[in-house]
Amino acid sequence: MIRALLFTLVFYVNTALFLILGSPLLLAPRTWAMAGLKAHARASLFWQRLIVGTRMEVRGIENLPAGACLVAAKHQSAWDTFALVPLFADPAIVMKAELGLIPFYGWFSHKFRHVLVRRDRGPAALRQLIRDAKDRAAEGRQVLIFPEGTRRVPGAPPDYKPGVVALYEGLQVPCVPVALNSGLFWPRRSLERRPGTIVVEFLEPIPSDQNRKQFKILLEKTIEDATLRLLEEALSRDPTLPRPERCKEHKSNKDGTIT
């Protein structure tokens, strides 16, 4: 817990320094600002590894196509919001519009031209989401969305929102599912930070020719099965990690499949 508290302090000081000292980037080309965003992520990962002992392993990066695509990632931790950024050439993250009102953080979100969604506007928000995402994809950027809309406890039942299906239909580009196990090491709503290896896995892209129902079923099954496998793998490496209820109902085979 001492190491966790020290890292939390360092993380927020590091973030504040990047935001304040990097504020001139608000007037610079967007690519420069994006480089600063990636530098912040790398610095945060460095401090996490040094202080807490948490490493990051990336698998399947070859499944990420060059140019525009839709990326749908599991969301278990605040870690996901910064650590994934350096893995993409030029990501546009789908996020709630309220975050765009926060001083410095929100200003940079507009500078990065992330996709800000007014979720209180219902169908109108979905239409605006598709328009903005098409604009970013036309620039060759990767549109990153967390399909469940918020952080979910590892092993919690999936709760995929309609936004990812609307984007898939509207963009007409391949969708790359992403599984991870970050919630075991950086739990939501907790100051606890645990040592170990956070695994991020890019899975085989879903072609752009699926219908709505097929896509939703395939996306959810692909992400959830792979995420459960990563959770089980981490638990087998370190039995002291808290075991999610859902994992207690499954058994991992030697070939990595879940029964």
Image (cartoon, rainbow, N blue to C red):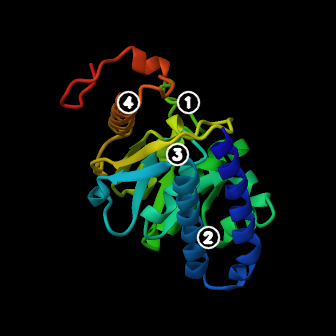
What is the distance, in whole Å, between disc 1 and disc 3 at their CAs? 14 Å
Which numbered disc, 2 or 1, marks the residue closer to the eye? 1
> Height in image: 103 above or below 3?
below
Quadrant assignment for the C terminus: top left
* Amino acid residing under circle 2: Phe
Q: Position of residue 23 (x, y in %)?
A: 74, 77
Quadrant assignment for the N terminus: top right
* Amino acid residing under circle 1: Val
Q: Which mark is residue 153?
A: 1
Give the mark, 2 or 3, whose residue is nearer the N terminus.
2
For this orientation, the residue located farthest to the top is: 249
Which numbered disc, 2 or 4, marks the residue closer to the eye? 4
Where is mark 3, residue-wise? Answer: 146
Q: Position of residue 150 (x, y in %)?
A: 60, 39
Where is mark 4, residue-wise? Answer: 228
* Amino acid residing under circle 3: Phe
Q: In terms of secondary structure, where does tag 4 sit? A: helix
